[in-house]
Amino acid sequence: MELPTNPFKAALRAGRRQIGLWSALAAPASVELLAHAGFDWLLLDMEHAPIDLGELRGELMALNGSATHAIVRPPWNDAVAVKRILDLGAQTLLFPVIQSAAEAAAAVASTRYPPAGVRGVAGGTRATRYGRVADYYGKAQEELCVIVQIETRAGLEHLDAILAVDGVDALFLGPADLSASLGHLGDPRHPEVAAAMEDALRRCVAAGKPVGTISQDEALARRWFELGASFVAVGVDVLLFARAADALAAKFKG
């Protein structure tokens, strides 16, 4: 059996734009429903959503047979957590709160087997198709995609050094935490935050590094693409559900 290809990484290399959706409902059934909605990728969020490893396994399985790729955000830039997520078969990881080149390098190292990194070696995992993928250990790195999230003032200050880290495939600009770090908590559209986001995006594009972000505002999401973003999350499942439920109830209670 051959190593599964990573369509998200291939699209980044080919320069194809990709739209995604944030998934925080923490339910394989909701992921299965979203898998056939037409998004290129879903972000399975272990940082803020109550998703444990067992639930993550179910969510990854729920995407089988669809054209939607899983991006998993670990709870932290932690080699132990990353090892277990990779063994479940995740191929693209979004590392939160990366603030320096050293932290970016540690993220990359957690996805590589020794001597290139520190990933632990295990046989018979879901990632290896239970031992069926030929030379998984030698080839795994080819299809793994490392995205580092820039979402603090320190991350912006060290952006050029982070961009130069070997093995970082893409960057993601996080407006929510960045707004807090810049002193505008709860206001990701503040002019200072927007200016910092645009400046960082342009620097990534100039460096030839794919960059993504999130916006639930259609016009702003399209603007990010116009400025050169390679991938943008255009919604969050929890908020879509809440707004639709609120609107339906209001129709009958108004």
Image: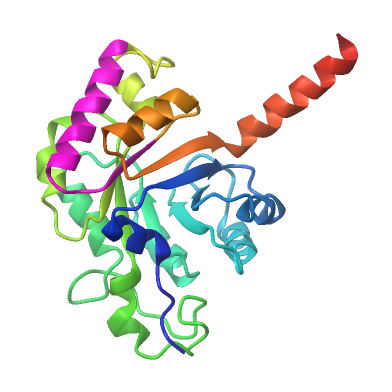
Residue furthest right as drawn? 252
Q: Nearer the viewer, residue 122 or 238?
A: 238
| Vertical arrangement, residue 26 with respect to residue 88, above or below | above
Residue 153 visible within the image = no
Where is residue 233 shown, x and y percent of the image? 46, 39
The mark tally for this picture is: 0
**Residue at the spot x=35%, y=43% of the render?**
96
Q: Main secondary structure of the magenta part?
A: helix
Residue 33 visible within the image = yes
User: Dividing the image into 4 quarters, which one contains the C terminus?
Assistant: top right
Q: Nearer the viewer, residue 201 or 73?
A: 201
Q: Would you say residue 10 sits in the magenta stretch?
A: no
| Vertical arrangement, residue 179 with respect to residue 230, above or below | above
Query: In this image, 177 relative to 43: left or right?
Result: left
Q: Quadrant of residue 189?
A: top left
Query: In this image, 50 relative to 212: left or right?
Result: right
**Residue at the spot x=49%, y=36% of the render?**
234
Q: Would you say residue 211 sits in the magenta stretch?
A: yes
Where is residue 237 shown, x and y percent of the image? 61, 38
| Vertical arrangement, residue 106 with respect to residue 136, above or below | above
| Vertical arrangement, residue 95 with respect to residue 122, above or below | above
Where is residue 106 shown, x and y percent of the image? 22, 56
Tell me which segment is drawn in magenta: 191-213
